[in-house]
Amino acid sequence: MEWQQLEYFQTLAHLQHVTRAAEYLSISQPALSRSIARLEGELGVPLFNRQGRTIVLNRYGQLFLKRVNRILMEFDVGKRELHDMVNPEHGEVALGFLHTLGTSLIPDLLGAFRVHSPAIRFQLTQNHSYSLLEQMNAAKLDLCLVAEPTETKVPIQWKPLWSEEIFVILPTNHRLAHAQSISMEEIADEPFIFLKKGYALRETTDGLFRQLGMNPKVTFEGEEVSTVAGLVAAGLGLSLLPDVGLDKSKIVYIPIRQPKCRRVIGIAFVEDRYLSPAALRFKQFVINYFGRMESI
């Protein structure tokens, strides 16, 4: 069995189309077919059910693909480890973070880090918690800045870094726009605009309403904090958000008087999984960075 056969098999298993797989691999279709046939001959079982140029993994192929993915991932990790040993000042960090952190916090954090480590590159992914943790489970992300994970497929280590107060967000012409603080009972009958289900912030706000025994009237759900704020500014409802550096010319942030609402953000990584020197350096930088902020 040749290493190249495993790569060919993995590509064909993902694309499940001979022509497209051959084009992606820059080889001829007959060469790809011969390679897969030799692999199946050596394994003693067919891996695909064939329908013309379209093929579908059978149960043998599905089982074998899990092992091949693991083998090739370990090979890639090995290459990274060797490269990192030779180039400890370089490398790439795959970082995931929540939508609400992208306005100002992440740019400030990366800017501060690059002052001391300018050669380290970043691959950035912005999404909600569940999606980020899925990508980290699949080894596509090194580190994530998220709220504390609840259910994950692999052992996740999570270290709290900072907490954020959650405010009521109102349009500037709202009857309570000049209040010093607001109780949740005062806005119980108002329409609300929230992020979609699955976002960590949505879980926090839903938990607040459950705690109070209230059922909010949700009229809009968005995927971006800026979209939610824009709908609030247009007078379509209220929202509950941390102060994420949005334009305050059309919205106002009012503290919640009772009960106080906060969320905690931390750094997550997979326990015992290899992290490059670049990722380890950034991880420690983040921990120190927010440790300094807490002490100020």
Image (cartoon, rainbow, N blue to C red):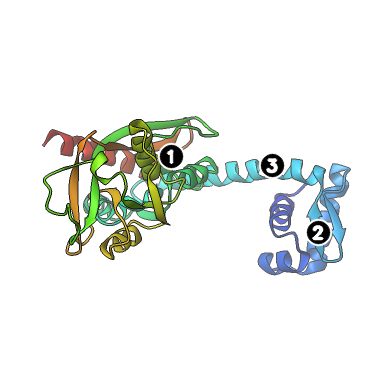
Residue in front for this viewpoint, 82 or 69: 69
Q: Measured from the top left, where is residue 162 in percent x and y?
A: 25, 37
Residue 137 seen by the camera: yes
Q: Measured from the top left, where is residue 195 in percent x and y?
A: 39, 51
- Residue located farthest toward the front when viewing the structure as drawn: 189
Q: Which mark is residue 66?
A: 3
Dot 1: what SS? loop
Label 1 packing within 10 angstroms: few (<14), some (14-19), many (20+) = some
Q: Quickly name the residue at label 1.
A: 275
Q: Residue at x 34, y 52 (%)?
A: 192
Amino acid type shown at disc 3: Lys
Discs 3, 2 touching: Cβ within 8 Å: no
Amino acid type shown at disc 1: Leu
Residue in front for this viewpoint, 226 or 163: 226
Label 2 packing within 10 angstroms: few (<14), some (14-19), many (20+) = some
Q: Measured from the top left, where is residue 113 in percent x and y?
A: 25, 49
**Which mark's residue is nearer the viewer, 3 or 1?**
3
233 on left or right of 149: left
Residue in front for this viewpoint, 124 or 129: 129
Amino acid type shown at disc 2: Ile
Dot 3: what SS? helix
Q: Please report whichever mark, 2 or 1, sits nearer to the chain's N-terminal start.
A: 2
Q: Residue at x 39, y 49 (%)?
A: 217
Q: Quickly name the residue at label 2.
A: 55
- The alpha-carbon separation of the residues under discs 2 and 1 comes to 37 Å
